[in-house]
Amino acid sequence: MTLSHFQIEFEKMINRDYFSDKIHPMRKEAFSKFIQNGLPTKKWEDWRFTNLASITTKEFHLSEVKDSPKGTIDLSPYQIEDVDTIVIYNGHYLESLSSTPPGLKLLSGLEYLSSKKGTFENSDNSPFDLLNTAFMDSGIAIIVEPNTNIKKPLRLLFISSGKNHLMVSPRVHIDVEESSSLFFIEQHVSQNSESYFQNESVFISVENNSQLDHIRIQSNSESTTNMANLHVKQQADSQYSFFQFADGCTLGRLNIYAKLKGEGADCALNGIALSTGNQHLGHHIIIDHKVPNCTSSQNFKSILQDQSSGVYSGRTIVRKDAQKTNSTQSNKNLLLSKDALMHSIPQLEIDADDVKCAHGSSTGALDDEALFYLRSRGLDILSAKKLLVHGFVSEMIETIKHEPTKNSIHSQLQNWLIHYS
């Protein structure tokens, strides 16, 4: 997709009657910066291992009314018990299939903009952030008001479908106000989808003494490109826990920018990536400790088959005044093929002197001694390998607090292992 084709689609966006012209200046400013910067290339340091051919060699189109569902949608393949679900189909909010738990406010993007007196947070951290602001659709704001504990988990289910080479740009704002809590699930799935490009931006605010548990399940079809831009701000004594399970997409890239702005904030980021064929799944993390007495952790694992590739680029920044910081990074990767390739880049930038910071990385194949031991106990070679692969990541899944979500992800892991050979 060339810049000129983006320009054509942007003009369509601006001329749509059902989008408010109140946000046109915001869109135009972001698109102007995007055109000026262009798409990233491998000459850019943070993008040198990311091949954007799945975007640059195809032409994508905005989702139209005709791309909304025809008839009944079967949601049973994506069933997770004991959750409320908001359904987004090809960028279209399906109110009739959606529900929200008591105590939670759900606003449209325009309603949220109005509540923020005509402006809300944007980012220009990368061209894809700018692209999201220019084309943002599926605008949703999830608000947990002060002193409110939402007992039932909320799921945001994104469904991609069809053969129309669609581009969607969800914009999600999540505000967890003071002394409140929420368990939030994002799930990305496909129904007969071909050549789909989703560029999502999520802006999260976790206020004083609040907690957000965030699960992201990325299981799009292998003809999908999923670009996720996640921006997190935490205030004093807040807790943010993130876990991603990714086994879909030809190109899936997770970009997390977390800022710890209040003392006592705790940020725990975790992820599992399972890739096969020619898939590329990347995790790109920046945690910025701006104040003292905060804690952060990064724990990411990848399992790679065939000619697939992956990236872990984790950076922890400790500012000069952020004394008593405690931060860890761990990246472990399992290569199941000689042709699989993993890039691991843990980084620490420390300007304070009274801190505890550590990072570690390892990449390798299955342990021969462990395989020999299992085979000596009667397992065939394939069963032994599957057991070791399962053990490599299953303990991370066990940390998920919501039992039905945990069971669903365990099932997806088992399905992936069935096709492992």
Image (cartoon, grey):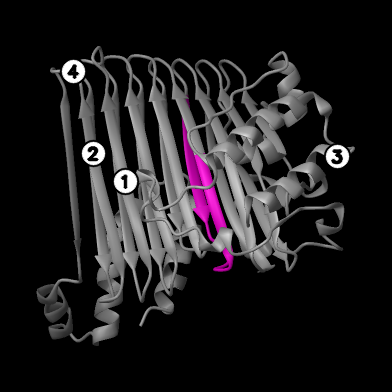
Question: Depth-wise, is mark 4 or mark 3 nearer the camera?
Answer: 3
Residue at mark 1: 313
Q: Label 2 sits on what residue type?
A: Gln
Q: In 3D space, how far apart are the residues under numbered discs 1 and 3 (Cα atoms)? A: 39 Å
* Residue under label 4: 352
Residue 94 colored magenta? no
User: Label 4 to label 3, Cα distance in Å?
Assistant: 51 Å
Question: Which is nearer the eye, 38 or 197?
Answer: 38
Given residues 33 and 406, the one toward you in this image is 33
Q: Is residue 228 left or right of residue 353?
A: right
Magenta extent? 211-229
Which residue is at a point 69% across and 58% down the rendered structure image?
Answer: 60
Snapshot quadrant of residue 107: top right
Question: Please, is residue 135 above or below residue 292 in the view?
Answer: below
Q: If you read the primary sequence from the N terminus, does the residue marked by circle 4 or circle 3 appear first?
A: 3
Counting residues from the N terminus, which is met first, the one under dot 2 or under dot 3?
3
The amino acid sitting under disc 1 is: Ser
The three-letter code of the residue at mark 3 reads Asn
Mark 3 falls on what kind of element?
A: helix
Mark 1 to mark 2 CA distance (whole Å): 8 Å
